[in-house]
Amino acid sequence: MPALDGSVPSTAAAAAAAGPAARAARRLRSVPPGLVLAWLVIAVVIAWALVPWLFTAQDPVSGVPAEKLQGPSLAHLFGTDAIGRDLFTRVVYGAVHSLSGAFVAVTVGLAGGTLLGVLAGSIGGVVDAVVMRLVDVLLAIPGLLLALSIIILLGFGTVNAAIAVGVGSIAAFARVSRSEVVRVRQADFVEAAFGSGGRLSAVLVRHVLPNSLTAVIGLAALQFGAAILAISTLGFLGYGAPPPTPEWGLLIAEGRNYVATSWWLTVLPGLVVVAVVLSANRISQSLGRTR
């Protein structure tokens, strides 16, 4: 349609006007379905942890003995355990213990490992050599053995198990953060910042750290899933939350004596753990590709 001055609007202008909406639509269409499913699983589990009463109205601790060891049904989606407690309710209420433990573990590993990695990568020399030898020692110790050793010192419980798992992940965060700091420090804009009189602390905060955190965040997402698995393993072995706490690893451990007759007591909580860990790994992969 001609404009008031008689000119015809160009197709380029029309395309530019529709550009943001079209780009947003293309980005939504380009998101892999697997990534959408992973975010959906994590969102549901986080909702379980924050508002569990919206998903179930039953008690996670007390049960009805007359309804013990019932299979999955509409009344009990995951069946019931040996004392008549609704297993789905216990899985939902157990999300807060597993997720909070994983958050503590990732926070400990992220803070400690990033600090060591930044110190080693930015200062270099003797500090770098000492820190990385310490990291090599931590990596040489099996993660489960290190976690069990720390739990013996700290005591049992979900928080102590999370701290133990976090200490075991410090080495991985330190190696990744050091390599990223070394890579960014060699960039031209960092050299220009030093050449213009910038102090080491200021250059690290303004230039090095913001450009080094992408890989560390991707590792944090990966470690989140690994932390859930490790904390569930410790709970299964009896080093996590005590009964009757509905922690995921403990739920699987409580059902192992009924595997032959009541498979749902171990299989269904185990599938929840597997789904959350795989979803966290998928999200970590997507964050790694955005570097």
Image: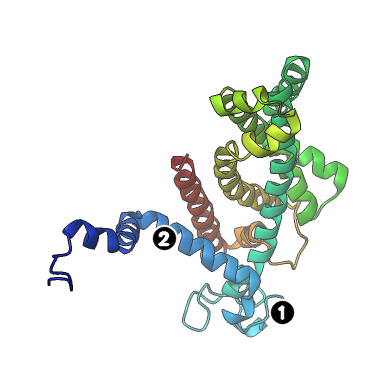
Q: Where is residue 27 in the image (x, y as percent from the top left)?
A: 34, 56
Q: Where is residue 4 in the image (x, y as percent from the top left)?
A: 18, 73
Colour setting? rainbow
Tell me the quarter of the picture where residue 108 sits: top right
**In front of the other: 2 or 103:** 2
State if disc 1 and disc 2 touch (CB < 8 Å). no
Q: In this view, does 8 lie to the left or right of 184?
A: left
Could you give the CA–CA distance between mark 2 and mark 1, rounded to whole angstroms? 33 Å
> Residue at the spot x=67%, y=53% of the render?
102
Q: Position of residue 171 (x, y in %)?
A: 69, 32
**In front of the other: 279 or 196:** 196
Tally of numbered discs: 2
Q: Is residue 150 left or right of residue 283?
A: right
Tell me the quarter of the picture where residue 197 sits: top right
> Residue at the spot x=64%, y=71% of the render?
50
Pointer 1: residues within 10 angstroms few (<14), some, or many (20+)? few
Q: Which mark is residue 277?
A: none
Q: Residue furthest top?
A: 125
Residue position for label 1: 62
Residue position for label 2: 37
> Dot 1: what SS?
loop
**In front of the other: 262 or 104:** 104
